[in-house]
Structure formats: C-alpha cells, structure tokens
C-alpha cells in the first residue's frame, strides 16, 4: 500500500510538469497582448517597453518559465496579478472555500437524488417507477445547467417576485444565511448532475443484485431492505464514487458559469474575470493549482476503493 | 430495451448449461448468423425502430434538427441578423411565432439557424476529433514502448485540466470564431478519446491475425491500416455518436460566456448568454426557447447515441 502511494505520487510529478509547460506555452505563444491593452486602454505605465520590463515580459521565455515554476516549487509563490499586483495564492485562498462549498453541496444534491432514484429503479426493475426514474434521469441529463440556472434566476423574479440573494455572506459569518444563498445554485447544478449518478447507480446495483452472495442472503431469509442497503449497496457504490471523481473537473469547470450567473465570489468567477482581462499569471496559476488538485483527488479516489472493497489491495 | 435485456439474459443462462468449450459468444453468434438476411446497416436501423423506442424518438428529434439546419434558408421566416427596432421584445404573435429579441430579431428564425451552427460545430469537431483520436490512439497503442509512455503522460496532463477551464483559456486567447471553436473542440475531443481507441488498439494488437500478418511480411503501415484500423472503427463510431451531445453542450456553454461563436451568428448558447441576462427579465421567452431547443437536441443525441451504442457495441454484437 505504502509503495503504491509513493509510486503514484512520483508518477504525478511528470504529469504536473507537463501540465505547467502546457499552460505556460498556451499563454505565451497565442495571440493577444495584455501589455498593449494595459498601456493603451488603462495607462498602467508611460510606455509599452517600460511596462514589459516591469512585468518581466522582456526576458527570454525559458527564464520566465523558470522564474514562475521556481517561485512555486521553492517559495510557494504563485506570482501576482498583472492588473492588481496582488499575490495570486492569497486571492485563490480567499475564494476557494466558496467554490469548494458549492462543489460539495452540488455533489450532495446529485448523489442524494441519484442514489435514491437509482436504488428504487434497480430494486423494482422494469416497473413503472423504474421507467419514471430512468426518464427523469435522461431529462436531467439533457437540460444544460446554465440554461436551467438562467431560467431559475429570471422566471421566478418575473412571475413570483422572488430573486436569489445577490449579496454573498461567508459561511463563517452567518452559516444559515450562507446556506440560503448557496442552496439555489447547488440545487440547480446538482439536479442536472444527478442523471449520470442515477444511471451508474442503477446498473451497478442491478449487477451486484445478481451475484451469488446476494442469493445467499435471500435464501437465509433476510428482508429486502437489509439486503439492498447493507449487503448490495456498499459494493455498488464503487462505480458511483469513481464517477464522482471523474466528474470533479466538471464541477470545477461548471463553477465558472454557475458563479458568474449567481454572482458568487469563488474561484470560477476569479478565473473568468482574469480571462477577460488576459491576466496570464492568474489564468496560468489557477489552471495549475486546479490540475494539481484533480491529480491528488484521483489518487484519493483510487485509495478509497481499498476501503470500500477490502479485496482490492495495492 | 426490455426485449434486449431479456434476450441477453436467456443467452447467458443457455451458456451456463453448455459444454465448457462452447463459449456464450459463439452460442449467441450462431443463430444470429443463420437468421440474418439484411445487411448490418439496415439491421441496425430496423432494430433501432423495433427494439429501442427512446432511441427512435431521439433519432426523430435529430432528423428534425438536421432538416432545420439544412433547410434554414427556405423555412426561416426572416434573416437571422435582420433587425427591426420598432419590433423589439414582441411576445408570441402571428408575425413572430416565438417573439423577438432586444434588436427586434425573430426568435424562431434564430433558433432555426442556431441548429445549423450547433450541428456545423458539432459534426466538424467530432470529425476532427475522431481522426485525431484514431491517429493518436492507434499509433500510441500499436507502437507501444517509450513512445506510448510519453504520449500517454501528455494525455494525462491534458486530462488533469477541467475541460471548461482549458477550453476557455484557449478560446480567450484565440478569440471567438466558428472555425476556432470547431478546431479547439475537435482537438479536445480527440485527445480525450484517444485513450479509448488506444485501449482497443492494444487489445487488437495481441490477436494472432496481427502476428500472422507481420510474419507474412506486412509492414507496420500495412498492418495498421488493414488489420488494426478496421477493428477500431466500431469503437470510434460509438465514441463519436455519444460525444456529439457533449460537444454541442460545450459549444453552447462557451458561447454562453461569450467565448464561442461570435455575434451576429445565432447559437443557442449565445442566445441564452450571460451578457443578455438583463433583457430576459423583460422578455422571458428569450431564455425559455433556446433552453428548450438545447435540451431537446441534447436529449435527442443522447438517446440516439445510447441506442446506437447498444446496437453497435462489439461486446453485444450478435445479441
């Protein structure tokens, strides 16, 4: 187990190196010049050359890369925004809890919905409730979350004079108020993500229910509820968990849109604002941090299999 | 759906009573070969209509969308960029069946042309992506060794990014345009699915017919094209059909953020756009119809893709 973890962590190093090179190259070799825009549009510096020197853009590309990656590895310094000159890591740290909370609540909603409907669907295969559940899952899968989000923001405000709360309150300041704000975005996002969870849950449970140990459980006279909830569910959860792991990047990517619509000050909005201002260091470092998180999360999920299914050993 | 699962269940039961050297696949394939009289591509459609009602509904939706896209110039009542400032924010009326937007453009017209752009980007990206996925996957899987290791680490790195973040970064640098988004989505789709193709190529490579071909003196190029590629094609078709809805949705979300297809081209994502949110309070139909169109399209492609996968999946072949 220990050796496996060490090997996986070592394998992640070249991956993250390639990630950093890719994101850096993207930012440097593509058209769009931030310095021109900063000088002409906003008079950040007297001349273009002065600003380029100031931002370090006049140095050779490989030096710029080494400077950026060296700062991260050696000092934990992810650079600063071109426009505000604020350290990126500080801003990321301030905003990350919002995005994490949104992601966790979204997963909670989608898993709660998906698992319950999936269990009912599998336990009553080919019954009316199975068909209703499956059609619901397909519908949920088809509605784009940003479309649903726009409808949820617009329609109730016209017809019921109800609007989502626009001013964000941190969880640490007022937990109840905070949850009230986060509930609507999480519900919207979670409902549209429940479809895949339900489908995987259903097929995994159907698969497990046909296995010998379940037949044994039936024949020793156990009731349906303990068979499904205690014996079958745990094994059927493995694909569900790997699905959530696979979808984690989707939750973070989706947070760009959800946070923009519901005006939540999270990482997604931070990223999107930086993008529209061509703030390279921010886009670059946020991409890298999140990619590193995804890699770490995948490792954690692989390890969690060993906990769920003791037969799996590394 | 039901008859499918039942047929499958009966088959596996029959297999358990058969002698051990008689594999369930052979048991399944034999009667199917005897009864099959239609060519396989007709068979697929017949089975789709009889055995997969949801898939047939999906197919019908896709056909309507295709018709709208192809016939847009004839069936759309107005021009897609034709503005009329005196007719702004008109709700449903006889002149404008679905109403008009903030510039007095007819919503129905824009929805119809939106189908064209969605399909154009969707099919274009899938075509580029399928070729790319095949090239990377087959070469990487067939050659193996150090080359494979290197390519796969690069694919790992690409997959570590949340797709939307990476696509947004690239699109913001390239600038929104129909061509850019098609190519970018195609490349993303190709890299992502090269894994699947590589997996199949690795399996095919181990078959003895590949070894025989090599022993008979076939070069790597010939082996790849005549022996590996034909066996990878069904997987590519499945990946492509199920990927269409994802590509269309991704295009819509990028256009929604203003980094996909630029105005004045109408796209469903762009019509829902973040920038136009303020107008929707005045004219909710501006939000409703594009959302409905997008959902229907994704629903159609999902259902059709699922059904086709059931029919084409090599593991279910002959069932």
Image (cartoon, coloured by chain):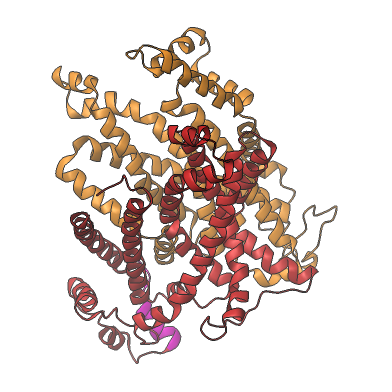
Quadrant where the N terminus of chain A sits is: bottom left
Front-most of A287 and A82? A287
Image-based side of A35 in relation to A114, left or right: left
Q: Is residue A153 above or below residue B69?
A: below
Residue at image x 24%, y 49%?
A: A314
Spot the red chain and give its letter: A
Residue A40 within the segment the image draws in magenta: yes
| Residue A38 shown in magenta | yes
Q: Position of residue B201 (x, y in %)?
A: 29, 33
The residue at 54%/71% (across/down) is A259
Kindly indicate the quadrant of the structure image that contains residue A213: top left
User: In the rendered view, would you say A89 is above or below B203?
Assistant: below
Which residues fall within the magenta stretch?
A31-42
Locate residue B256, reporting x and y percent. 56, 62
Left or right: residue A242 compared with residue B273: left
Q: Quick one: which residue is furthest to the right in this view? A: B94
Tally of numbered discs? 0
Q: Is residue A121 visible?
A: yes
Q: What hue does chain B carry in this figure?
A: orange
Residue shown at 30%/38% (left/top)? Answer: B198
Residue at the (25%, 85%) spot, across then down: A53
- Residue pushed farthest bottom? A46
- Residue A240 relative to residue A306: left or right: right
Quick one: A107 or A219, which is closer to the camera? A219
Residue B98 left/right relative to B220: right
User: How would you classify the magenta stretch by its main secondary structure?
Assistant: helix
State the residue lying farthest toward the front. A220
As displayed, is residue A55 above or below residue B175? below
């Amino acid at each position: 187990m220990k050796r496996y973890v060490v090997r996986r962590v070592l394998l992640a190093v070249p991956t993250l190196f390639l990630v950093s090179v890719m994101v850096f190259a993207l930012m440097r070799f593509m058209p769009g010049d931030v310095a021109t825009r900063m000088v002409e549009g906003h008079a950040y510096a007297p001349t273009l050359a002065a600003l380029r020197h100031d931002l370090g853009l006049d140095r050779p590309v490989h030096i710029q890369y080494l400077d950026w990656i060296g700062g991260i590895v050696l000092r934990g310094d992810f650079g600063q925004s071109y426009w505000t000159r604020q350290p990126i890591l500080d801003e990321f740290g301030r905003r990350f809890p919002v995005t994490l909370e949104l992601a966790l609540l979204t997963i909670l909603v989608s898993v709660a919905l998906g698992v319950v409907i999936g269990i009912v669907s599998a336990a009553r295969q080919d019954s009316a409730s199975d068909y209703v559940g499956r059609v619901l899952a397909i519908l949920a899968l088809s509605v784009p979350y940003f479309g649903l989000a726009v409808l949820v923001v617009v329609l109730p405000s016209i017809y019921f004079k109800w609007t989502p709360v626009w001013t964000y309150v941190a969880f640490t300041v007022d937990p109840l108020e905070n949850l009230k704000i986060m509930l609507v975005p999480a519900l919207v996002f979670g409902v549209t993500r429940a479809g895949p969870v339900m489908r995987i849950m259903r097929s995994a449970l159907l698969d497990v229910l046909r296995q010998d140990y379940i037949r044994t459980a039936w024949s020793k006279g156990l009731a349906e509820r303990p068979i499904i909830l205690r014996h079958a569910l745990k094994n059927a959860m493995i694909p569900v968990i790997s699905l959530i792991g696979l979808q984690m990047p989707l939750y973070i990517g989706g947070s760009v849109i959800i946070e923009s619509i519901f005006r939540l000050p999270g990482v997604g909005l931070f990223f999107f604002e930086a993008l529209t201002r061509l703030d390279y260091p921010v886009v670059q470092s946020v991409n890298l941090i999140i990619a590193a998180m995804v890699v770490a999360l995948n490792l954690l999920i692989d390890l969690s299999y060993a906990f769920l299914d003791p037969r799996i050993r590394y | 759906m039901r008859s499918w699962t039942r047929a499958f269940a009966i088959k596996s039961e029959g297999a358990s009573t058969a002698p051990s050297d008689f594999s369930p696949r052979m048991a399944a394939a034999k009667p199917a070969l005897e009864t099959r009289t239609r060519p396989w591509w007709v068979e697929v459609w017949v089975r789709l209509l009889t055995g997969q009602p949801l898939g047939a509904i999906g197919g019908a939706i896709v056909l309507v969308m295709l018709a709208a896209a192809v016939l847009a110039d004839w069936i759309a009542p107005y021009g897609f960029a034709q503005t009329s400032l005196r007719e702004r924010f008109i709700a449903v009326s006889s002149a404008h069946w679905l109403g008009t937007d903030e510039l007095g453009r007819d919503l129905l017209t824009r929805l119809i042309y939106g189908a064209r752009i969605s399909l154009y980007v969707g099919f274009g990206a899938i075509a580029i992506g399928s070729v790319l996925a095949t090239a990377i996957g087959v070469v990487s899987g067939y050659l193996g060794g150090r080359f494979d290791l290197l390519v796969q680490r690069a694919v790992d790195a690409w997959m570590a990014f949340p797709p939307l973040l990476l696509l947004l970064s690239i699109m913001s640098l390239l600038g929104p345009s129909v061509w850019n988004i098609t190519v970018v989505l195609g490349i993303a789709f190709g890299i992502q699915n090269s894994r699947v193709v590589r997996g199949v190529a690795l399996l095919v490579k181990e078959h003895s017919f590949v070894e025989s071909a090599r022993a008979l003196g076939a070069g790597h190029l010939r082996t790849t094209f005549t022996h590996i590629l034909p066996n990878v094609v069904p997987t590519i078709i499945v990946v492509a059909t199920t990927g269409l809805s994802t590509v269309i949705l991704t295009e819509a979300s990028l256009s929604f953020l203003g980094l996909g297809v630029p105005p004045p081209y109408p796209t469903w994502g762009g019509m829902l756009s973040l920038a136009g949110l303020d107008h929707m309070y005045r004219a909710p139909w501006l939000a409703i119809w594009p959302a409905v169109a997008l959902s229907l399209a994704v629903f159609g492609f999902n259902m059709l893709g699922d059904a086709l996968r059931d029919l084409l999946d090599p593991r279910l072949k002959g069932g």
